[in-house]
Amino acid sequence: MDWIRQQAGNTSRQPTRSNQSTPVRAEPSTQQALTLEEKKAILLTELKSTYKERYNVVQPIPYIKDKLYCVDKVFVEGSIEGFIERRIPFSTEGSWKRLTSYNHIFTDPRIESVRRIIVGEPGYGKTTLTLQLAYDWCNGVKESPFLDADVLILLRLRQLGNVQSIYRAIKMFLLPNEPRVKQSDIRAILEGCHRVKVLLDGYDEYPERDKTTGSDVDQIVRLEKFRKFEVTLTTRYLPKDLTSRKPNE
Ligand SMILES: Nc1ncnc2c1ncn2[C@@H]1O[C@H](COP(=O)(O)OP(=O)(O)OP(=O)(O)O)[C@@H](O)[C@H]1O
Ligand SMILES: [Mg+2]
């Protein structure tokens, strides 16, 4: 498990963009004709369309409701530190080190892991960071650590109370209006992918936080499910089950 924390304070950022655009919608003529590959193309188009709806309505000033922006127009690099572990005989030590870019959360070789936790106080920009990562993936930004991801799943944990299945969650919240791709298709598509990245935003808002429910989210957090996928959790505080592994301040 790797730990990342957000801090107050910003620096500017000037990324280089590639020209890659969102792929066109696959429109096979009949339901019978749909192969899993075609359903995957539909899934990707729908995910990108859902993320676009979200990253295009960032509200930089909370009390001004009519000024909405694309995340990429307002996003500035925050102060982010990663917990860098050193393995020593019979134990592990470590310290917090400044990361120069949010991309380094995923690319710094010192914090290589399939599970990451981004901890930040209220308003420090956890949700905004997930939206920027989604923007970068959707728009093929060259520096994006998710550029080579087959699929990016970004879910808000506050919506997932009583939702046992992660595939159901994806269907309900990311493809609500796409009858051609069913829950079972989503499962088959993800199982056939090598590089799936998952962002679970707001563990502190998850109705079943700190409970052992056996739900997919519960299993994912505890590395019992999606073991080969990179999963990142954002939260205001460390999940209870993991506090024994909390890094030193
Ligand atoms: N990197 C950033 N660049 C510019 N504005 C930001 C950035 N991060 C956050 N903001 C602004 O700060 C506000 C709060 O950010 P956000 O909702 O992402 O915080 P959060 O950490 O998710 O908070 P919470 O713990 O309440 O969920 C938003 O209005 C957002 O526009
Ligand atoms: Mg948030």
Image (cartoon, rainbow, N blue to C red):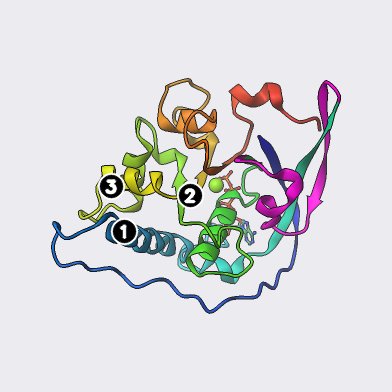
Residue 88: horizontal and vertical position, in percent?
Answer: 86, 28
Which of discs 1 and 3 lies nearer the camera? The answer is: 1
Say left or right for 148 vs 86: left
Question: In the image, is residue 200 part of the stretch drawn in magenta?
Answer: no
Numbered badge on residue 166 = none
Residue 104: horizontal and vertical position, in percent?
Answer: 71, 55
**SS state under label 3:** helix
Residue 150: horizontal and vertical position, in percent?
Answer: 46, 57
Q: Does label 3 or label 2 sit earlier along the sequence?
A: 3
**SS state under label 1:** helix
* Amino acid marked by disc 1: Glu
Q: Mark 3 points at which residue?
A: 185
Task: Classify 112 as above or below 93.
Answer: below
Q: Name the residue under label 1.
A: 37
Question: In the image, is residue 95 part of the stretch drawn in magenta?
Answer: yes
* Amino acid marked by disc 3: Asp
Q: Does label 2 or label 1 sit earlier along the sequence?
A: 1
Residue 218: horizontal and vertical position, in percent?
Answer: 47, 28
At a point 37% along the width and 60% down the height, the residue shown is 44
**SS state under label 2:** loop
Look at the image and give the residue range highlighted in magenta. Answer: 89-115
- Are there few (<14), some (14-19), or many (20+) residues within 10 Å of tag 3? some
- Are there few (<14), some (14-19), or many (20+) residues within 10 Å of tag 1? few
Asked whether 49 or 20 is in front, the reply is 20
Q: Residue furthest bottom?
A: 19
Asked whether 229 or 153 is in front, the reply is 229
At a point 81% along the width and 51% down the height, the residue shown is 98
Task: Find out if the beta carbon at label 2 lies less than 8 Å from the nearest ligand 2 atom.
Answer: no
Q: Name the residue under label 2.
A: 194
